[in-house]
Image (cartoon, rainbow, N blue to C red):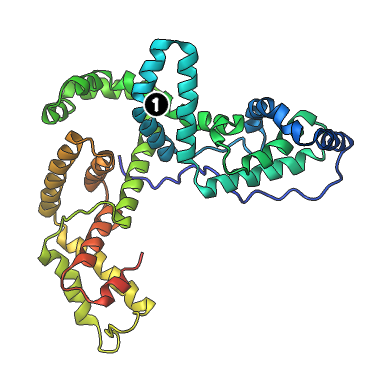
Amino acid sequence: MPRKRHKKKAEINPSLPQTPAAPISTQAQRVIKKIASGGENYIRDNFERIMLASYDLADEPEFKDVTFPENKTIRSTEKWMKKNQTRLERATEKGDEDLHQALDDVRIQIIDDILTPQLRKDVLTRLDNLTKRLMTGVDTNKLENTLVLNPLLKMKKLPWGICGLILAIYDRSVKPTLEDVSIMDEVFGDLLDDMEHNDNIDTLLAATKESEKINAFTKKLESIPGLRERLEQQAENYAVDFENALIRGEITLTLFSKVEVEFALTRFLKEMTPDQFDITKKPSEQVSNRFIELIRESLVEIMTPERLQEMKTDLEKLSKKWLRSKNKWASGLMTEIYWLDELEILENRFLLIVYTNQLKRFEGKSSIISKSLRP
């Protein structure tokens, strides 16, 4: 299964076409007068109704294709459900009303965790565009919703997790994940059950290599339309997040020896003239590009079939350790291990990032290295 560079689905894009100025409809004018005549009490008296009714706004063109970032949504949901596990269990024992209240509170925490300032800004931009469009039409109910909802969402103390529109977007974002969980349970049912009752990672991994289990898995995989593509996309997402964490320095890996790290640096220094190797100045774009090119060339020479297999063995040991400790990056690492055999060295972004990171940490580095290896 060769690696494909998928483009992640656009979650929220604020750059929507601006609605051209148009006359305000008679129906819109009536709604505006109605709200204005109600004064401060209007929002208070209609707060709950507006919040609930706003759920339908998620189907409008401005919000129809909007979802929250998949991985962030999954992680936040898992985090807050786990933190509130005891409370939810107690609420379940007390009855449906207590359980629904507890779940509502947890959703508020999840959504607050998901929504960055930029995401909030994007939602408000779309809401503004929706309001402008409705001002020229005849749908008075939805226009009333947007006119009241807009200032409410701009209140700093109002939790967005009680807003129907935001809940609809969250439900839309998390639904595919829940479907995937159901499918995964069907496809990987026996293995998942084993993992729940067996802490021996070596035994579990060995079981996944048994021909009988592989054949059963393949049969189920092909029987569900689109599942293979979804799994490939999910693996791609794991790898992208993992590689970005490496770039940010959240994960530190040392896969190359000191000699291997010195290899590219030595070649680089041999090519540099005194003018080019002036550590008091920022290297030119040409010098920086040549350095990156030399790193790629060095990786091709370093990563012989034997060295690749050796590195793969080391990474497999690390992946088992991460699986035992439930490290959140285990899935990303396992994807990268698979791609070691599938990708050409020059196509392998993971190897380039790890090698570059080790160069930056190299004890004998000069400032020209860190300047040349800019993100």
Position of residue 66 relative to residue 258, above or below, is: above
Left or right: where 21 falls relative to 365:
right
Query: Picture coordinates of residue 360 (x, y %)?
Result: 24, 66
Image quadrant containing the C terminus: bottom left
Query: Picture coordinates of residue 201 (x, y %)?
Result: 14, 30
Could you say which quadrant of the image residue 1 lies in? top left
Which residue is at 19% across, 39% downward? 322
Residue of label 1: 180
Query: Picture coordinates of residue 117 (x, y %)?
Result: 52, 49
Give the residue type at disc 1: Asp
Left or right: where 227 falls relative to 317:
right
Could you say which quadrant of the image residue 275 lies in? bottom left
Instruction: Kindly tell me whether residue 225 is visible in this rendering.
Output: no
Left or right: where 167 falls relative to 344:
right
Relative depth, front residue between 148 and 341:
148
Left or right: where 103 falls relative to 240:
right
Position of residue 292 relative to residue 32, above or below, is: below
Relative depth, front residue between 361 and 272:
361
Furthest residue to the right? 26
Query: Picture coordinates of residue 371 (x, y %)?
Result: 32, 73
Q: Of helix, strand and loop, which one carries label 1?
A: helix
Instruction: Kindly tell me whether residue 195 is visible in this rendering.
Output: yes
Total marks placed: 1
- The crowd level at tag 1 (other Cα within 10 Å; few <14, some 14-19, many 20+) is some
Position of residue 218 relative to residue 232, above or below, is: above
Could you say which quadrant of the image residue 87 lies in? top left
Which residue is at 48% across, 27% downward? 105
Relative depth, front residue between 66 and 268:
66
